[in-house]
Amino acid sequence: MSKTITQPDFKTRLQNILPKLVLSPSLALILVFVYGFIAFTIYLSFTDSRMLPTFGWVGLDNYVTLFKLRHWSTAINNLAVFATLYILICTIIGLALAIFLDQKIRFEGVLRPIYLYPMALSFIVTGTAWKWFLDPGIGLENTMHLWGWESFTFDWIKNREYAIYTVVIAAVWQTSGFVMAMFLAGLRGIDNEILKAAQMDGAGNFNLYRRIIIPQLRPAFLSAFVILSHLAIKSYDLIIALTGGGPGRATEVPATFMYSYTFTRNQMGIGASSAVIMLMTIAAIMIPYLYAELREKK
Amino acid sequence: MRKISKLSLAVVTAFMASTSVALAEEVEVLHWWTSGGEAAALNVLKKDLESKGIGWADMPVAGGGGEAAMTVLRARVTSGNPPTAVQMLGFDILDWAKQGALANLNAVAAKEGWDAVVPKALQDFAKYEGKWISAPVNVHSTNWVWANKKVLDTLGIAQPKTWNEFVAAMQKVKDAGLVALAHGGQPWQEATVFDGVAMSAGGPAFYKSAFIDLDPKALASDAMKETFNRMTTLRSFVDKNFSGRDWNLAAAMVIKGDAAFQIMGDWAKGEFLNAGKVPGKDFLCFRVPGSEGTVLFNSDQFAMFSVSGTKAVAQAELAQSIMAPSFQSAFNVVKGSVPARTDVPNTAFDDCGKKGMVELAAASESGKLFGSMAHGHANKASVKNAIYDVITAHFNGEYDDATAVDELVDAVSLANK
């Protein structure tokens, strides 16, 4: 008798406990290896660590030095230029592509993956391919010269002032297809009844998009913005493959700055403080987003 | 079927080999010499150790300057399991010694008489607080110019002896429609050029007080401004597509006769030799005009980490083999550098190698042998890279000469805190 009672009891208890049991190792791992190390990095940014972590407290010294470094201000400026243009152009091209693909055209099933495909490549591949394509000696400029257009010049990648824009070009090529997919999903989610009603009221195509469809895509815009902005802030591999931070140091961004100070220049304290600044920048974007998302759910 | 049995045989032999190695004494060596010639040169060392019954656990981490290797090393040392020996450069060795991670090789050094044969300037990087901590393999030197002899002969240019002659020669090449100076626009290459130019513009005393002692007065001096001025001159002789080019491609331009000169360390010689060129006949090697008599060096060494028991015995054997004149000669003939001890016979070396050996010995005698700033033998990594930043920004046109001097003083003071 008692057996029949305890048996389901144990089972239900196990059932209750199992999800927690299964999740706890990964939770513990995440706590240590993500949040633990974030805390460790923040701590290191206040220490005199050079080659290996050391624990001599120096207060805000690293941050003061960091903002005195011209190298860091170059990195920040580059990030501002890169992130603004990258997010803006990606969104515009992605939205345009999505709207055009949404016109119930033929071969949509073929076109969509073609635009989406660059996202499947790694940034290293994108960077290397664009490096060759943009190189005046072997790429576009050389080809144009061979075809007889002798006066054609396109040497942005070798030009300190313009090199950062080549990074934008490559990054936009890589990601705008993905943004298109996000907008396309948003467009497909819009209720057809609303559109029909609007058309009956005599709204033209332009007004239809401007007043009804695009405003309804607000969540898609927000997701696109958040994804693009964190891609921009953490971009590292693309820069390394495309320009190597050059010409000179002209295309350094905070991520490459962080790596070089932490691991090759033996100034781990300054590297850690730049990592903290990057984390805070991302947090400044993500926290309002998460807050808005969570509030909507209620 | 035969394929499978062959495969399984291979697996079994590999397994046997690995176990037999594991039983004997073994050295584990972390290095980044993975390219053909370098790997072949290391084989000499491997064979030598095998003849003494010591196994070699190879731990290659590819990547030119060893950045990747250093990241691996940090992880190994932090986890308390360092490799026996690690290929390392200049100040990195001293930094590790400061952390107390390196072994004491004084017993071997005394037995083999290292103190007498290794140049004093080099000992500063191989000894810490009176203890030998690493075994230098070679001495590279950075203030070299490599020239295509055929190009110079056709244009009637003699080997330039002074800076002005050098500039005139480059102008002549440029006027003839060729590239005067083959250069790759990467920060370390610009710094390598800067090394020789600074020495030629300011002389040994200036070089020492500016880049080794980091004296702010020397950093802000007129000689420094003249150095940047000369860099601007050089900038006008490179082709417009220089930025980002690898050094070996720049060397190839000189080899092919598209360009006349390249300022690069003696590792460039390997490229010329591999292309079947003969020193003195097809190409010339000479010091950056104005820096003759001085040698700016960097040296590959094997830093020995603290290990215990039989590992330490094997480590001592390894150190002894590295410093043996036979290995020093065999390795450096292939690598393009010169031996780290001055008593190695020069019979196996080519003309440039012989020249390098004589000049190294002479510079060491006369106190004109200095660590290369560009290759981490004048100052620690943070300062080196801060100087790189300024040199490369100036070379790419961001600063004029006077601003570059001011920026250099600032950058060094920030990095040297």
Image (cartoon, helix red, strand yellow):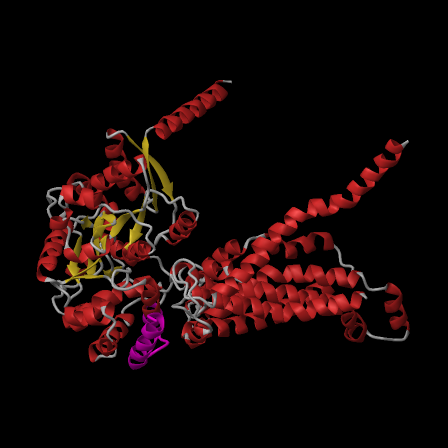
Q: Quadrant of residue B344?
A: top left
Per the image, is A45 magenta? no
Residue A190 x %, y %? 82, 64
Residue B225 x %, y %? 24, 78
Q: Magenta span covers which residues?
A: B388-417
Residue at the front extreme, as displayed: A2
Per the image, is B411 magenta? yes
Q: What predominant SS class does the magenta segment belong to?
A: helix
Q: In which quarter of the image is residue B12?
A: top left
Q: In this view, does B306 lie to the left or right of A288?
A: left
What residue is rendered at 10% in x and 53% in y?
B358
Q: Is residue B8 above or below residue B260?
A: above
Q: In this view, does B31 lie above or below A198?
A: above
Looking at the rendering, in which quadrant would you find the C terminus of chain B? bottom left
Q: Is residue A75 above or below residue B220?
A: above
Query: Is residue B270 visible to us here?
Result: yes
B354 or B313: nearer the viewer: B313
Residue B14 x %, y %? 41, 27
